[in-house]
Image (tube, rainbow, N blue to C red):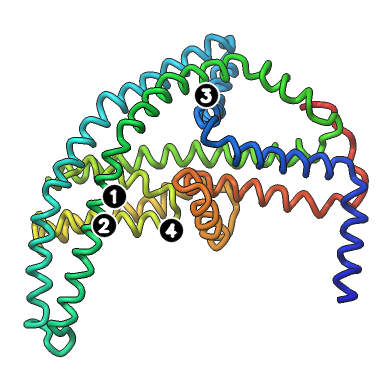
Amino acid sequence: MQHLREWLSDWFRRILPNAQAVSFAILLVVGFIVVVSLAKMLMPVFAAGIIAYLLDGLVEIGERRKLPRLVSVIVVYLLFLALLLVVFIGLLPLLYQQTLQLIEQAPSWVNRGQVLIMELPERYPDYITQEQVNDLIGAIRAELISYGQSMLTYSYASLVSLITVVVYFILVPLLVFFFLKDRDRILGWFTQYLPRDRNLSNRVWKEVDMQIGNYVRGKFVEIVILFAASFVTFSLMGLNYALLLAVLMGISVIIPYVGATLVTFPVMIVAFFQWGVSDDFWYLMLAYAIIQALDGVMLVPLLFSEVVNLHPVAIIVAILFFGGWWGFWGVFFAIPLATLVKAVLSAWPRLGEGEMPAAGGP
């Protein structure tokens, strides 16, 4: 106990007298409170800010090629709008159609699956009894009823969701344009309220900016490549719901180590009920395994070499923690948030090693 008190006393003596540490801690706490308390109200602003942050890298590429910033912003913004139109007009209707077809097909799959399950006691009497099969079927039926009730609730609330999507579709692109166009003015207004001596904040931000920017941009490229490769492969092999499954394949890379395992089940189920345990089924699973292997062995090292140097255990803990807190967006930003925590922790213990030089810039 005495050693603990001495350690705490020494830690407070090193940290608290440092004005930069105190101001940085206050900035983190205030930022966290603002995000948590105003997330639902200001979600379009946060979303637009994140998109603008990602697009700003493309704007800077144009500036390095001697384009005026306004011209570079307009070019990047028009490309962004074109991508939105392709997604909302070309991709989403097809996804919606295939999802409806999948829902309509699900009852027949359930019946076929029930027949296969009922045959298990006859094929493997030493391992599975009829009572176990009945319990399994009852549990599956209860889950299906629960999912059906959830779908009804979702359909009831779909009108509100549709209105929200329309509002986001108008506000977010507008905010993105102004964030890109007036980046320096907005940052200047924000930094005037921050302490002048913020060397620690600048150091942490430079590391986080490099890591997060490279990670999110690389993750976007990985999603697009995996989606395209999966869609072409599934379509050429004649797999049903190729577009829907390819989208799931692309989205699965958001959750490292877990997403690839989860997306295997829908691909396997669709292929099984379409072809059974046939040569086509095994060819499809082989192609799927090759795509996943190429993603893990070639694409990920190429896109993320020397980016986000986090241990796999830290990544999984971050996904569980932030995903449980903020749902889908917590999972999506789990690794960037973990990178922020790592940058803060790596900078913090060095504060007692001496006074850091003052920094006047933002």
Between discs 3 and 1, the one toward the N terminus: 3
Q: Residue furthest bottom?
A: 126
Q: Residue 18 placed where, x, y %?
A: 90, 45
Q: Quadrant of residue 200?
A: top right
Is 175 left or right of 1, judged from the image as shown?
Answer: left
The residue at 26%/57% (across/down) is: 146
Q: Kindly identify the amino acid type of the residue bearing the numbered disc 2.
A: Ser
Viewer-closest of 222 and 189 = 189
Viewer-closest of 203 and 110 = 110
Asked if 153 appears above or below 275 in the picture, the reply is: above
The residue at 55%/38% (across/down) is: 214
Query: Mark 1, residues whose alpha carbon is within 10 Å: few (<14), some, or many (≥20)?
Result: few
Between discs 1 and 4, the one toward the N terminus: 1
Query: Mark 2, residues whose alpha carbon is within 10 Å: few (<14), some, or many (≥20)?
Result: few
Circle 1 or circle 4, nearest the eye: 1
Cβ atoms at labels 1 and 2 below 8 Å apart: yes
Q: Which residue in the structure is indicated by mark 4?
A: 257
Query: What secondary structure is found at the residue carrying circle 1?
Result: helix
Circle 3 or circle 4, nearest the eye: 4
Cβ atoms at labels 3 and 4 below 8 Å apart: no
Asked if 209 appears above or below 149 in the picture, the reply is: above
Query: What secondary structure is found at the residue carrying circle 4?
Result: loop
Is 190 left or right of 226, judged from the image as shown?
Answer: right
Is 329 left or right of 232, judged from the image as shown?
Answer: right
Query: Mark 4, residues whose alpha carbon is within 10 Å: few (<14), some, or many (≥20)?
Result: some
The residue at 58%/22% (across/down) is: 60
Q: Which residue in the structure is indicated by mark 2?
A: 146
Q: Which numbered tag is attached to residue 58?
A: 3
Between discs 3 and 4, the one toward the N terminus: 3
**Gap in Å between the C-alphas at discs 1 and 2?**
6 Å
Q: Which residue in the structure is indicated by mark 1?
A: 150
Q: Kindly identify the amino acid type of the residue bearing the numbered disc 4.
A: Tyr
